[in-house]
Image: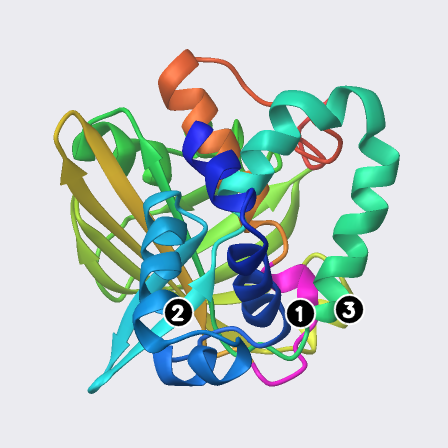
Amino acid sequence: MDDVFRALADPTRRRLLDKLFKEDGQTLGALEKRVAMTRFGVMKHLKVLEQAGLVVTKRRGREKLHFLNAVPIRLIHDRWVSKYAAPWAAALSEIKEKLEERTMEKVFEIYIKTTPERLWQAITDPELRRRYNFGVEVKSEWTAGSSYRGLGHGRPILEGENLEVDPPLRLVQSFRALWADDVKSEGTSRVTWEIKQVADSCQLTVTHDQLREGANSQLFGGWPMILSGLKTLLETGESLTTPGSLMYAQV
């Protein structure tokens, strides 16, 4: 968490994050044009942001795209903010989501001190998934071509098909939200879970793409809380109790 604060302390790095907040998935060349700095200077600042986990990169052909990763900021929220100012933070999060509605792809990255096998189990086991996924139980055979469905309070919340299943490293799924009429109308998008072992930890990257331009932000706005809850569960054995984190839990 110290790396996050150090990265955010510099005004140029905050300005780069602002540019990604406004338009996600930019190349180095595009970012260079938006700040008064040499290409080398922008590269150095982006490297610091990547090391702090605030920026995630993905290759698209010959291009290297940069994405704002909100998960580390969410972890700070869960540690200090939610206990004292949850209603205000929720309102600000809603504003942030509305500003990001034009995105076509969102990328989230987090490091968790666990093994790939335990992480895969937490993603595919209905009871473990329920503890960090808003109380939703997700059940499936977890084979390529099989369907999956998430239930909360006994009603369907989400569903889709497992397009690629490569335990414990990669899971690609179609995704359709069912919890309200306004998200049902968005149709089908895609979610990719990628697990990479790094020393005694795992790097988990979640990419939510194939979203229409201007898609309802509810489709992707919950990922920071989900991944924060997943990290908390695997590293401490406890569940988050922040507002909304168990909204579909059985009572």
Question: What amino acid type should be assigned to the residue bearing mark 3?
Answer: Asp
Task: Find the distance from the CA under tag 1 to the CA under tag 3.
Answer: 21 Å
Question: What amino acid type should be assigned to the residue bearing mark 2?
Answer: His
Residue underneath mark 1: 100
Cβ–Cβ below 8 Å for labels 1 and 3?
no
Front in this rendered view, residue 155 or 246: 246
Closer to viewer: mark 1 or mark 2? 2
Residue underneath mark 2: 66
Cβ–Cβ below 8 Å for labels 3 and 2?
no
Q: Position of residue 162 (x, y in %)?
A: 31, 62
Dot 1 or dot 3, earlier in sequence: 1
Quarter of the picture containing the C terminus is top right
- Helix, strand, or loop for circle 2? strand
The scheme the figure's colours follow is: rainbow
Front in this rendered view, residue 179 or 245: 245
Residue underneath mark 3: 181
183 with respect to 127 (left or right): right
Closer to viewer: mark 3 or mark 2? 2
Task: Find the distance from the CA under tag 1 to the CA under tag 2.
Answer: 15 Å
